[in-house]
Image (spheres, helix red, strand yellow):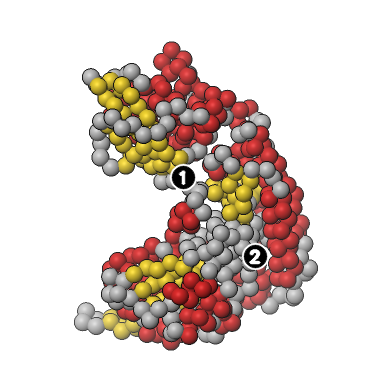
Amino acid sequence: MTVARDLRAASTRATAAPFDVAAIREDFPILRQTVHGKPLVYLDNAATAQKPRSVIDAITRFYTMDNSNIHRGLHALSERATAAYEDVRSKARRFLGAAEEREIIFVRGTTEAINLVAHSYGRPHVGPGDEVLITAMEHHSNIVPWQILCEEKGARLRIAAIDDDGALLLDDLERLLTPRTRILAIPHVSNALGTINPVRRIVEMAHRRDVPVLVDGAQAAPHLPIDVRELGCDFYAVSGHKMFGPTGIGLLYGRADLLEAMPPYQGGGDMIASVTFEKTTYNRLPHKFEAGTPHIAGVIDLGAAIDYLEGVDAAGRIAHEDGLLTYATDTIAALSRVRLVGTAKQKTSVLSFVIDGVHPHDIGTILDRDGVAIRAGHHCAQPLMDRFGVPATARASLALYNTRGEIDALAAGIRKVLQVFR
Amino acid sequence: MSSDLGDLYQEVILDHNRTPRNFGGLPGANRRAEGFNPLCGDRITVQVDLEDDAVKEIRFEGSGCAISKASASMMTESVKGRTRAEAEALFREFHRLLTEDGAVADPATLGKLVVFSGVREFPVRVKCATLAWHTLRAALRNERGVATTE
């Protein structure tokens, strides 16, 4: 049995059964444990999602059966590994709705994807006095690479504002799309607020002014259907570990004509066609952007994660997640002294909140003793925290395996916090 | 509330969190340091009026969790009037209480600070409790830059 054949079999399996959260939970072994004597309630999915059994097994199977380097071997293992690796590119193309496989670049994660674009697209296109436009709700990974670029080039980083609910002000964004704007980078879903941005509309605005758009899709991938051609964006980045796959692997989609024109990000093996000491000819897409031996097992495991997500009834999953978010929002909003941060109309999966007179870290510690895992802090979005005038928030973030019972456990934990900090 | 949570959030700590002592700026200060916990973003400024090698007056400002705020508040109370060497020795003793397995809280040395012994059961919170002390030490040693718990 080979991985390649396994993965093909998985991708052609019959239509998914109707969504059943109890059955889904069975797929995630880690959820069966207790923490401090209480059942684990994992609500830190925006930081990283848990892994289903199939993803956990796929990496073992690869190292047990097929481990080999790719794109060079003449032997059976290398052929199998190469086929499995490239098969995931094909799955990823389908998952993101890209036109061609060569538009899919394997990277370490969203952060590396953005750095790649800032470097290989940004450096040749951004000059002194030019502008790079981002939004007030960015994760640091969609701020710092652009800051570095702007500093190097004498360009200006401009920030589109958001309203008090955490929704992007489209008028402001449009105003900031100037003749000097060279690229616009936005999140599909805000990691700290859960706001879903109207990417298609934003892309239309930007394209009217010939500004290409990069979309940080890290938080969207586990929740929303993604179709880069429908969105119209030029670059789209995701992280494997947020979508039930392994850490250290992610995807960059880039429009073929843009990628073709871009210089490589890193030099090394696999990204070359030929090398002499005088001159190197770069490999064709996508290999031009995949220098060195990649995270082969990670790619194959990411394929297992895509299979898992695609094997779940999507409409049922989205209905479950939407229902859960509404239930959680109502439950938390009903608690005294608790204020939700991020109340945009279009939202998914994230509940950031603050409690009057209680620091989020104390909330986190008290909830942890009840087995409830949340994140407390600035969520790598310090400028966003400043926008809302809070040093940090507590953040519960949902995934397909969470239940209403778990939201009740969260609420019980918050009541305990209110009791301690009367 | 489970007993270890009760040990962590003792009434004295909650009280200092609610109404921190020696909170605010100190115009006459001749020693000053800033502390930062990059893990959680807590920031603190400690200002000291050092006279004849002793802490004559001390105040702190900043934002942080209950543990860091209470620790800063109680730190200011316990070092006031002490020499630099005494303050540093107290920090060493306090640190030992928080980090060493089986360390016995000695009220004779630590006074009210023994209430922080419950922090030992919460290793990720040790830095919250020590931030103010790291910052105090930086101020007393006249160190440049921002003190961190790292």
Residue depicted at 24% across the width and 33% down the height: B142
Badge 1 sits on which subunit? B
Q: Quadrant of the N terminus of chain A?
A: bottom right
- A381 relative to A30 in the view: left or right: left
Which residue does the numbered mark 1 point to in the structure image? B40
Quadrant of res A360: top right
Residue depicted at 48% across the width and 83% down the height: A207
Front in this rendered view, residue A274 or B79: B79
Locate residue A407, reporting x and y percent: 71, 50
Badge 2 sits on which subunit? A
Front in this rendered view, residue B8 or A184: A184
- A237 relative to B52 in the view: left or right: right
Residue depicted at 41% across the width and 22% down the height: B77
Say what amino acid the circle numbered 1 marks: Cys
Q: CA distance from mark 1 to mark 2?
A: 29 Å
Residue A414 seen: yes
SS at mark 2 in the image: loop
In the orientation shown, which residue stands out farthest toward the front? B27
Crowd band around label 2 with a 10 angstrom C-alpha radius: few (<14), some (14–19), many (20+): few
In the orientation shown, which residue stands out farthest toward the top? B108
Location of residue B138 with respect to B83 vertically, above or below: below
Residue A24 seen: no
Front in this rendered view, residue A26 or A367: A367
SS at mark 1 in the image: loop
Which residue does the numbered mark 2 point to in the structure image? A345
Quadrant of res A335: top right
